[in-house]
Image (cartoon, rainbow, N blue to C red):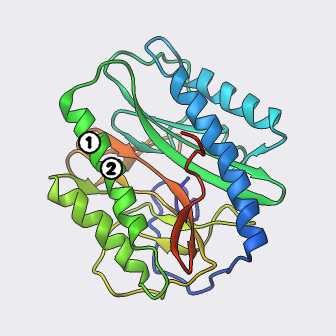
Amino acid sequence: MKGSLKKAGQELKGVSDMVVFKSPKEIEKIRISNQIVADILAKLKKEVKAGVTTLYLNEVAERLARKKNALPAFKGYKGYPYSLCTSVNNVVVHGLPSKKSLVEGDIVSLDFGVLFDGYYGDSAITVPVGKISKSAKRLILTTKESLYKGITKAVPGGRLSDISHAIQSHVEAAGYSVVRVFVGHGIGSSLHEDPQIPNYGKPGIGIMLNAGMTIAIEPMVNEKGCEVDILEDGWTAITKDGGLSAHFEHTIAITENGPVILSERIGS
């Protein structure tokens, strides 16, 4: 879930330097929460098929979280009514689960988070529904690649915008656009902390990155233009031009030895 979870349509502005640095013990707790998220997303991915509703996926996610004694992080947060964000095709983020069935050729982004033992986990994937077009596959792959490009820049001594620039450069080189009104964020004992992490920008600016920072990096990439519209529900963000959109997210810790991905499923 994006940024400071500014409700759809409210552009996030600036980057604060009020960063909360985490101890190794805290980072381990954040890792445990993110492993719960990673495990649930892996199970949800197997459930994605034609005929399945996104409301069903939401119910599965919530049930699995509670089975692990974790609280769904998004449900009730800023008024969000569900546990899972399900964004289908031209929905960028914050898609509301519904009784409408997925169909062959769709793509669906699943964004999920939990609170466990006082710390949050947050991650997102985009999943094909059966056989999808080559262009949709390329969009998904490019978005995932851009996430890892950004992660490689999350090193002590770097600048926040190095992450942003790496993502934007990879996305635009492939002919796509990055969404600008939603951003990544810090994470820890709060779901959204400073700093905000745009997916675009010049390198070498913003706060300095240091060991002990835990951040959620999450490129949202549109097939066509970067502009979005917000539906009347106040949450669902769609591409203005109707093009497809994909979304990937990992929570990471910056360490003296570089970035460690806390939400990458162990054994996956």
| Quarter occupied by residue 69 | top right
The residue wearing badge 2 is: 143
Nearest the eye: 99 or 137: 137
Q: Is residue 215 left or right of residue 197?
A: right
Q: Where is residue 108 drawn, in percent x and y?
A: 43, 32
Q: Residue at x 32, y 64 (%)?
A: 167
One can see residue 78 in this view: no
Instruction: Indicate the secondary structure of the residue bearing disc 2.
Output: helix
Residue type marked 2: Thr
The residue wearing badge 1 is: 139
Instruction: Indicate the secondary structure of the residue bearing disc 1.
Output: helix
Q: Where is residue 95 drawn, in percent x and y?
A: 50, 38
Q: Where is residue 43 drawn, in percent x and y?
A: 60, 29
Q: Residue at x 37, y 78 (%)?
A: 161
Compared to residue 184, the image places residue 87 above or below, namely: above
**Circles 1 and 2 in contact, beta carbons < 8 Å:** yes
Q: Is residue 171 left or right of residue 27?
A: left
Q: Residue 38 carries which label?
A: none
Nearest the eye: 43 or 220: 43
Crowd class of label 1 (few under 14; some 14 to 19; many from 20; radius 10 Å): many
Q: In which quarter of the image is the C terminus?
A: top right
Q: Which residue lies furthest to the top in this view?
A: 51
How far apart in space, not on screen, are marks 1 and 2 (Cα)? 6 Å
Residue type marked 1: Leu
One can see residue 192 in this view: yes
Compared to residue 170, the image places residue 94 above or below, namely: above
Q: Is residue 139 left or right of residue 251?
A: left
| Quarter occupied by residue 87 | top left
Q: Where is residue 155 drawn, in percent x and y?
A: 46, 78
